[in-house]
Amino acid sequence: MAGGSVVKQLGRKGVDVAAIVDQVIAKPEKIAELIEALKVEKRAVKFSYEKVLRLVSERRPELIYPYFDVFAGLLDSDNSFLKWGAITTVANLTAVDTEKEFEAIFQKYYAPIPGPAMVTAANIIGSSARIALAKPELTQRITREILKVEKAKYKSHGALSAECRNIAVGHAIEAFDTFFEQIDDKAAVVAFVKRQLKNTRKQVVKKAEQFGRKHGT
């Protein structure tokens, strides 16, 4: 299995994706093949290409970094699964972003938080801790973007959904918990979390309570 086209291997049923990831890491020249296939493939198998590249970016982001623009472009994809995968991959690449590519797309990356797609916003918020830890100089900007979730307008089945916003708020509390110590405006974050003690979603209230106990707020 170690030889030959990884694209062909991923087209087979029951393929071991983890083994493909190991293979690509061992032979990084195979990344170009996957990137090209991801660009042109029309069938569902393209999601396997994206997944492999995303998993490689988690373990060896420097191998995927030369293709940063490809994943930045997928942030605009009409396909939600490709978009969500790109959100994670781009966040992984910030660990090796010596050229400040992420700073150039910062506004584009965070634009979906106010709505209307909750899952997209949740993926962005969930990836933000990784970005803040990789690029602490962006912490305050990231914090301001995440705080927009409180007034976000998300739709479910075509109608505005307060419950969707509550779910995203829960993700925001978890993100802030991870990089709270490097946030300058802690008061704004603490105030946000305290307001969630009255949230109508029990899981969010629990997260707010845990945050308060952990950070002495």
Image (tube, rainbow, N blue to C red):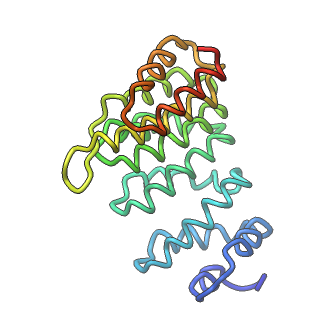
Q: Position of residue 50 (x, y in %)?
A: 54, 66
Nearer to me, 65 or 88:
88
Image side of residue 118 versus residue 215, left or right = left
Q: Residue at x 57, y 52 (%)?
A: 89
Residue at 48% from the left image edge and 23% from the top image edge: 193
- Number of numbered tags placed on the structure image: 0
**Quadrant placement of the N terminus:** bottom right
Q: Residue 24 in the image: x percent, y percent?
A: 72, 69
What percent of the width, then of the height, locates residue 146? 45, 30
Is 16 placed above or below 69 here?
below
The residue lying at 46 percent from left, 55 percent from top is 84
In the drawing, does residue 27 fall left or right of residue 194? Answer: right
| x and y, in percent, of residue 170 in the image | 47, 37
Q: Residue at x 73, y 54 (%)?
A: 60
Asked if residue 3 is positioned above or below residue 73 in the image, the reply reads: below
In depth, the one of 46 and 84 nearer the eye is 84
Residue placed furthest toward the left: 159
Q: Residue 94, relative to residue 205: is it above or below?
A: below
137 on left or right of 21: left
